[in-house]
Amino acid sequence: MVRIPEPELMEDPTQVESYDQADFESAHSFLIRKFQDRLPQRFVPESILDLGCGPGDMSSRLYSQFPNANFTFLDGSEFMLDRCKKRMGTLVSEKRKDKIDFKKELVQGFVPESPYDLVFSNSLLHHIHDPFEFWGAVQRSIHNDSFIFISDLIRPDSLTSANQLMERYAKEESEILKKDFYNSLLAAYRIEEVKEMLEITRLDSKLNLEPVTDRHWICYSKPRL
């Protein structure tokens, strides 16, 4: 099935609210466990970048795991970033707020002042029309010992399969969210497409890529020898 792009930014307030209120507990908990399982032993990052933080559900899970790190939460949508700020505001103590940076910025133009120890991204790549702009941002944000973890959706083989996934995993959600999930599935990249991206950017020597559910893949740093 040919990829059908969707808008790069989610800027409709009703869309953002629907996404923020959705029940991602099962999927996000699963992906965070996969992330934890693949972290190097005794890995304690001092600086963390969350690319495409959205309303902050994954961001809050990351913060809970590394509460002493310096965080940068980046999103191109002001509405999404505001939701993330509110969510993180309930977790971050006053004395820690200077360690948290929220950036309203497109991933395409993001140039960090210094590299991060951990670069994390969930469900951003499928929004980007030119995927190499995403991988370029990742490459600009790392040093030799950085750990990278990226997760995203897998595009189904057909519209029928996309409808079946939507009904299976978003049946109880709002009509807005069901439509967004369906469109995201159609905009997602296939595993073989992501593999080709890694080869072209020469990240294939640094990163493992694997499907982990019927609708998700993960990409993460290979263990250092």
Image: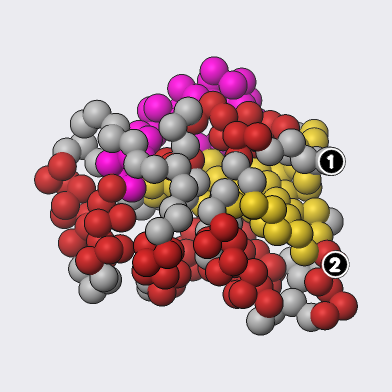
Q: Is residue 62 visible?
A: yes
Of 164 and 180, nearer the camera is: 180
Query: In the image, is residue 191 part of the stretch drawn in magenta?
Result: yes
Q: Is residue 201 left or right of residue 145?
A: left
Q: Disc 1 marks which residue?
A: 114
Q: Dot 2: few (<14), some (14–19), or many (≥20) neighbours within 10 Å?
A: few
Q: Is residue 181 left or right of residue 197?
A: left
Which quadrant of the structure image shows residue 170? bottom left
> What is the x, y in percent for residue 88?
66, 73
Query: In the image, is residue 153 part of the stretch drawn in magenta?
Result: no
Question: What's under tag 1, amino acid-wise?
Answer: Ser
> What is the x, y in percent for residue 129?
44, 32
Residue stretch rendered in magenta on the structure: 184-209
Q: Disc 2 marks which residue?
A: 98
Residue displayed at 70% across by 59% down: 102
Q: Quadrant of the N terminus?
A: top left
Callout 2 secondary element: helix
Residue displayed at 46% across by 48% down: 9
